[in-house]
Amino acid sequence: MTIVSFDEVLTIICDEYDRLIAPKKIRRSNKNIIYLIFKACAKGYELIANIIYALDGKFDPARCQDSDLLSVAKIVGTELIEGNGSGLIVFVTNNNPSTAVVLYAGRYIYKFNDDIKFFLDIEFDTSIAATESVQFAAFSENKGSFPVTSQSSILFEREDEADINPMLSFSCLENSDILGSEDETLYEFRKRILTDNTRSDIIKRLELAIKNKPYIFDASIFFNQYDVAVTVGNVNVPPYKMLITLLGFPRDEIAELVASHCIYQTVEVPDNGGVLRYLSDNMAGGAYEVFYKNFDFIDYKVVIDYRYDSRLTLKSVAESDINLALLPYKNPTKRIPTIKENLFYNLVDDLNIPSLNVLNITLLQDDVEIPYLDVNVSSIGKLSIVELNGTDIAE
């Protein structure tokens, strides 16, 4: 859209009027009532044009300013996907050989380094039997991926600086399978708004609300709206029931979140999930039970054939960089609906390794080559094997 100034509009109006009354011309003077009317029209046009220009693209996700994007998101019924902190499985062990010890409720802090802290929230006093251990989940304060190796002894302190029974010791497992992520970028958000046509669906809005819980790494919801059963992955979903699949450490508040969006019966998957309860006197039996399923993992293999020049880069360094970049796919915490070869082409290219040129990417599942991997809504693709085949052009 082109902005036309007041003087330009006035000139156009007067020139057009001159054409109509030729060979005469309008006298351009403030003492001429017709000229004053034309000036008023030009000013009105200028104001209208400025308003149109200001609003042009303001509510268009493809062209609006970043500052307007969140307002547009509310109009189209969605919001930013928030990142979450990395998780850490913590074991608290009672080293007393004969007496139970109480781990008192409160917030416990593990200082991983100067910048990263993990918080362990104990909601109620927990009695730990002699020589026994109890498992908990801690989360980093910062959003993002923060790998921690398995450690037999780590130091926790209480946030309120109260003493911790010396008979209690803390240890942790390596956390490669529960690493967090950053907030969705505005670019990713804009792209999702333009391509996602399901955002106004109440099920999708509930799914997004669950994903935005800091202790949930990913979530997927399938509602069977048909009058016959539907198979999702290896789960049979009866008519008009909802299958909720989660990755993380679910809490009962998710049941309340589900109830606030849509109260449907949920599918129970024995031995691969659990149940959450929203306590309410308005519910039959005093509670609304929400069953959930844990994500299944679908293994696949990637073969990367590449060419490099050993005079410019070391093979060991190149392959170390590639393997490091592939870690999020080896230990995934987010579901990718379709895994394609170009995902890995782009990933290796973005590393900008000197002289390295990717020749071919091959995807395999159960040792059978596949063009792509479709991942059902209750599963996550997991890169189980990476085979790197490098050819040195300097030889």
Image: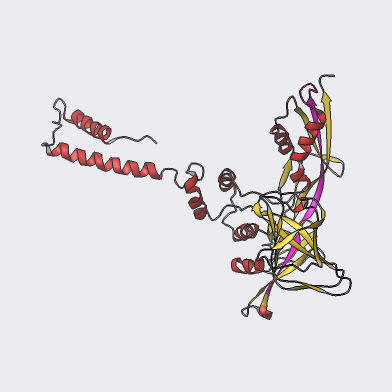
Q: Quadrant of the C terminus?
A: top right
Q: Would you say 279 lies left or right of 189 here?
A: right
Above or below, 71 against 164 in this view is: above
Q: Quadrant of the N terminus?
A: top left
Q: Write the residue at 21% across / 41% down.
A: 40
* Main SS class of the magenta portion in the image: strand
Percent across and percent down for residue 84 are 66, 54
Report the number of discs: 0
**Residues in magenta, as a range:** 288-313
**Looking at the image, can residue 182 be seen?**
yes
Task: Decide which of 296, 315 is in the foreground and name it.
Answer: 315
Picture quadrant where residue 267 is located: bottom right
Percent across and percent down for residue 349 are 70, 32
Percent across and percent down for residue 259 are 62, 69
Task: Decide which of 382, 195 is in the foreground and name it.
Answer: 382
Q: Would you say 83 lies left or right of 75 here?
A: right
Percent across and percent down for residue 129 are 84, 73
Picture quadrant where residue 188 is located: top right
Task: Decide which of 34, 154 is in the foreground and name it.
Answer: 154
